[in-house]
Amino acid sequence: MPAAALAALIRERQPCVVLTGAGVSTESGIPDFRSPDGIWAEVDPFEVASIQAFRRDPVRVWGFYRKRIHVVRDAEPNAAHRALAELEARGFVDAIVTQNVDALHSRAGSPDVVEVHGSIRSAQCLGCLWSQSAESALAQLDLDDVPSCRRCGEVLKPGVVLFGEMLPAAQMERATQLARSARLLLVVGSSLEVWPAAGLPLEAQSFAIVNRGPTALDDKAVLKIDAGAGETLSAVLAGLT
Ligand SMILES: [Zn+2]
């Protein structure tokens, strides 16, 4: 039973830190990016989700993110988010580092979530760096092509890290520290293709992977489970009680 093996690893190799990617949210109805029917099979990320595209054509980039914000707002945390929150509450997981921008870990009750790719719940001004809620940006989008900063009038950018942008330094530093402190880093729902987050497992003493399909680091993992996040983590949780 692979889930029982993972439960044993989590029990033995404390502290354990979790790294999640898009595969943890697909069961909530949020499409991932890189699978054959993922978002990037439909649109070119450099046309709709890069900082260069945003500077060239913010209307098009906001058109893409407007739909994404609605999808994320209507989604609910799934069994994987809830199992991870429960593992955290029981002291088996120290913190969750996530590549996701959907805030579903926090909504499932996880107290310590490090969002290394930003959050779709906010919008940020590139002029004065003021942040405001995605809701107020959406309200502006009903009236105008792009939302603008209430303070300085500059165009607002979605609060997510776009391609070509640096990751937020404080969050990435905390994520790296957490990974280095971990005897086990548990990767869930990430194909480990997007750096630098994909390098975090190599900072930990050991790592295990739960992901549908291959990842870039399968051959270095102590355990790889090729299965859905919800069913696997629910079984792991049951194995730890
Ligand atoms: Zn501003």
Image: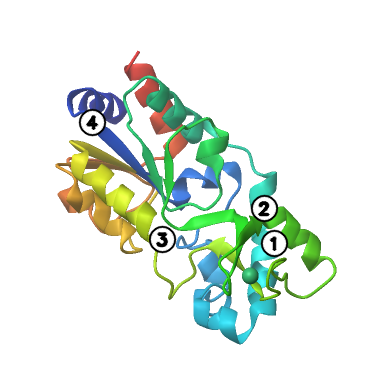
Residue sitting nearer the eye, 51 or 127: 127
**Residue type at the position of mark 3:** Pro
**Residue type at the position of mark 1:** Lys
**Disc 3 residue crowd, few under 14, some 14–19, many 20+, Cα 10 Å:** some
Between circles 1 and 3, the one closer to the viewer is 3
Q: Is residue 68 visible?
A: yes
Q: Is residue 191 visible?
A: no
- Which label belongs to residue 168? 3
User: Residue 113 is drawn in which quadrant?
Assistant: top left
The picture places residue 157, in percent across and down from the top left corner, at: 60, 69
Q: Which residue is mark 1?
A: 67
**Residue type at the position of mark 4:** Pro
Residue sitting nearer the eye, 169 or 215: 169
Residue 80 falls left or right of residue 217: right
Q: Are marks 2 and 1 in contact (CB under 8 Å)?
A: yes
Q: Residue at x 68, y 73 (%)?
A: 152
User: Residue 195 is drawn in which quadrant?
Assistant: bottom left
- Which label belongs to residue 71? 2
The picture places residue 130, in percent across and down from the top left corner, at: 60, 63
Quadrant of the image where one finds ligand 1 = bottom right
